[in-house]
Image (cartoon, rainbow, N blue to C red):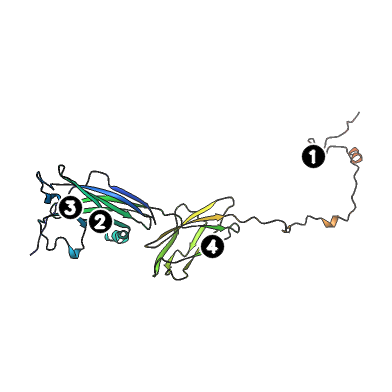
């Protein structure tokens, strides 16, 4: 015997989908209200028809369709969250929690409204579409789209790297571990818009468990010009974690010129012992016959010739 149950599916709602935003590594809790239209109560509903139960979707091993009466005494609704794919489900299922907050109905309008609390705790930036599915074995299926948006997290730390000169590399180091007892694969890269004068090593690898010393992350800085503000945003991420670091490249520290030896000997000690030679500029100028090189009219006679 193969029991066959046909369930009609309501058309998608005309209203825009619910959009829930949250910053990565934060937590937000939003109320999501859905309304289902159908022939629930009839013109003269009895108390039994106005009573209904709402509970989360059971596992496949305890499905509502196994050994079920297609005409139960009370109307029963099951709800669950559907993801776009199994891969999306495995990465996002732990970040979304849904539970019923309130239920109410309108006999005249044949409406049943359910209010859910949706807890969203993203660990990395992403944008995804999920579906809130409400199912009743006696009435059908309703689906309500929800958009989840996780924005960039706050910066974990600000790292300042002091330059040591043009085209010279200065580095800084810090250690990282995973947040679990196991090794976790990670990737390190800079966000678009970061200056190219920075580099990070290693680009990928494994973060050791939290009880170890951790792996050394090296961030380097090699400036190419003075009077420029160098900035970058470093991302280190695993399947579960997304860290942001703000990197600043600082100019070299000014050096004191007190004890710096000059490259040119400006003391002129060789000529200090020579006696000074005095010039009588009036007598020397009286002997001049023509203008010198520095004059506007070069080589012109200083005295007029009388015939």
Q: Earlier in the sequence, mark 3 or mark 1?
A: 3
Dots 2, 3 in contact, CB < 8 A: no
Q: Indicate which disc residue 120 carries.
A: none
Q: Which residue is mark 3?
A: 141
Residue at (29%, 52%) from the top-left corner? 117
Up-down: is 296 above or below 86? above
Q: Residue at x 91, y 38 (%)?
A: 286
Q: Nearer the viewer, mark 3 or mark 1?
A: 3
Looking at the picture, tell me which residue is in the foreground, 22 or 117.
117
List the residue tagged with mark 1: 294
Q: Position of residue 111 (x, y in %)?
A: 18, 45
Name the residue tied to disc 4: 172
Instruction: Give the alpha-carbon distance from disc 3 to disc 1, as whole Å.
Output: 103 Å
- Which disc, if any, is residue 81? 2
Viewer-side label of 4, 3: 3
The answer to whether residue 46 is above or below residue 206 is above
Q: Residue 243 appears in which quarter of the rendering?
A: bottom left
At mark 4, the secondary structure is strand
**Label 2 element class:** strand
């Amino acid at each position: 015997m193969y029991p066959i149950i046909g369930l009609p599916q309501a058309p998608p709602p005309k209203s825009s989908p619910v959009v829930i935003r949250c910053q990565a590594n934060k937590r937000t809790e939003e109320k999501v209200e859905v309304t289902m239209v159908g022939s629930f109560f009839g013109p003269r509903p009895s108390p039994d028809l106005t009573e209904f139960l709402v509970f989360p979707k059971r596992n496949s091993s305890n499905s509502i369709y196994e050994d079920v009466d297609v005409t139960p005494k009370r109307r029963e609704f099951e709800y669950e969250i559907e993801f776009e794919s199994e891969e999306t489900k495995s990465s996002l299922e732990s970040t979304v929690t849904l539970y019923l907050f309130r239920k109410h109905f309108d006999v005249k309008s044949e409406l049943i409204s359910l209010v859910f609390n949706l807890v969203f705790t993203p660990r990395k930036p992403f944008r995804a579409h999920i579906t809130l599915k409400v199912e009743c074995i006696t009435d059908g299926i309703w689906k309500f789209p929800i958009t989840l948006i996780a924005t960039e997290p706050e910066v974990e730390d600000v790292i300042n790297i002091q330059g040591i000169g043009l085209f010279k590399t200065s580095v800084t180091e810090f250690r990282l571990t995973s947040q679990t007892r196991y090794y976790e694969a990670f990737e390190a890269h800079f966000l678009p818009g970061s200056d190219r004068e920075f580099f990070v090593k290693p680009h990928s690898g494994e973060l050791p468990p939290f009880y170890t010393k951790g792996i050394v992350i090296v961030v380097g800085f090699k400036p190419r010009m003075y009077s420029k503000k160098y900035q970058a945003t470093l991302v280190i991420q695993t399947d579960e974690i997304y860290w942001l670091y703000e990197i600043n490249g600082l100019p070299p520290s000014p050096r004191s010129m007190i004890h710096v030896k000059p490259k040119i000997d400006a003391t002129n000690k060789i000529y200090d012992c020579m006696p000074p030679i005095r010039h009588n500029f009036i007598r020397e100028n009286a002997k001049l016959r023509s203008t010198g090189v520095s004059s506007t009219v070069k080589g012109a006679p200083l005295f007029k010739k009388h015939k």
